[in-house]
Image (tube, rainbow, N blue to C red):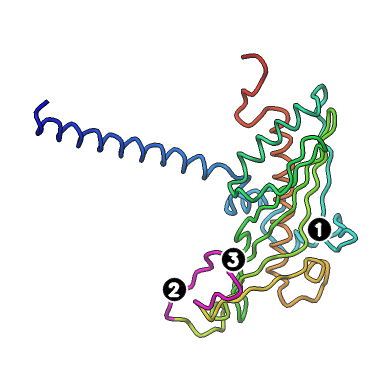
Amino acid sequence: MRPDRQKKLNLIMKKTMKWMLAAILTICGTLGAQAQVMKAADLEKYAKERYGDKWLDAAANLAKQLTLDKNQSLTYQEVVQAPGKTKDQLYVALNYWATATFKDKQAITLNDKEAGCIIISSTIQNIVEHMGTVNKYSVSITPIIRLDIKEGRVRVTYTVQNYDILADISGGWLSIPDKHDKTYGDSKRKADDKTNANLYDERWEIARHYPFVEKDAQKRTCAKALVMTHAYSNAIIDKVEEALKNGIVGNEDDDW
């Protein structure tokens, strides 16, 4: 083959490979974006549909139904029935669901088939952003999700002890405007990150804030945080039940 034709062919092949790689990355990115229980914006819509958008009232009503556990954590537990399915079948279904749902490779902290136990710890960021008088707050949570598997049933335990807070001391109603753009970015900043002196991290124990404590300087922030945390627990249990009954894509059966 003539050198000029070979050169042209190589160029076409390189362009084709780049196009194919871009297509694959686009597909993977789309799947990655879908591979989570629920985005914060969707979670807020879900919470409003169930509890309304008056966060103080919704949190007060929920507090009448909720009790904190012995560790002062907010814990939900529910047994999902899966009649006719073996422990191994349920484990495979839940392992598939957990792997496909939580993108962080470190999210699954325990995966023990013999014991029938899967434990997941994954952060959902910025479930609440609230502007106070002095500060602006971004709230994230990291629930611990435990799946205990037996013949024909799965027990789901969902626990949250703290709200992870990224506060902006220049973002409140009475704060002096900052000439720099303010962004919350990653709410799990390292302790030695001094890139923005206006931002600092806090951890608020749920038991020490509204509605479990009536007088709370962060009442409005914590009211919405509680409702969103509660809504996320419902979403988790709904997704687990759906995965057990219908699989992730709806065609994971033995008839193939």
| Mark toward the start of the polypeptide (1 vs 2) | 1
Q: Which residue is mark 2?
A: 181
**Where residue 2 sits: x, y (%)?**
9, 28
Relative to 175, residue 92 above or below: above
Which amino acid is tagged 2?
Asp
Pair 2/3: label in front: 3
Tell me the CA gap for discs 2 and 3.
16 Å
Q: Nearer the viewer, residue 131 or 28?
A: 28
Which amino acid is tagged 1?
Leu
Is disc 2 surrounded by few (<14), some (14 to 19) or many (20+) residues within 10 Å?
few
Specify the label residue 132 is tagged with: none
**Where residue 191 sits: x, y (%)?**
61, 74
Residue sitting at x 90%, y 60%: 70
Q: Which residue is mark 1?
A: 74
Q: Which residue is mark 3?
A: 187
Label 2 sits on a secondary structure element that is loop
**Where residue 68 sits: x, y (%)?**
86, 60
Residue sitting at x 48%, y 73%: 182
Q: Nearer the viewer, residue 175 or 243?
A: 243
Which amino acid is tagged 3?
Ser
Q: Nearer the viewer, residue 75 or 32?
A: 32
Is disc 3 surrounded by few (<14), some (14 to 19) or many (20+) residues within 10 Å?
many
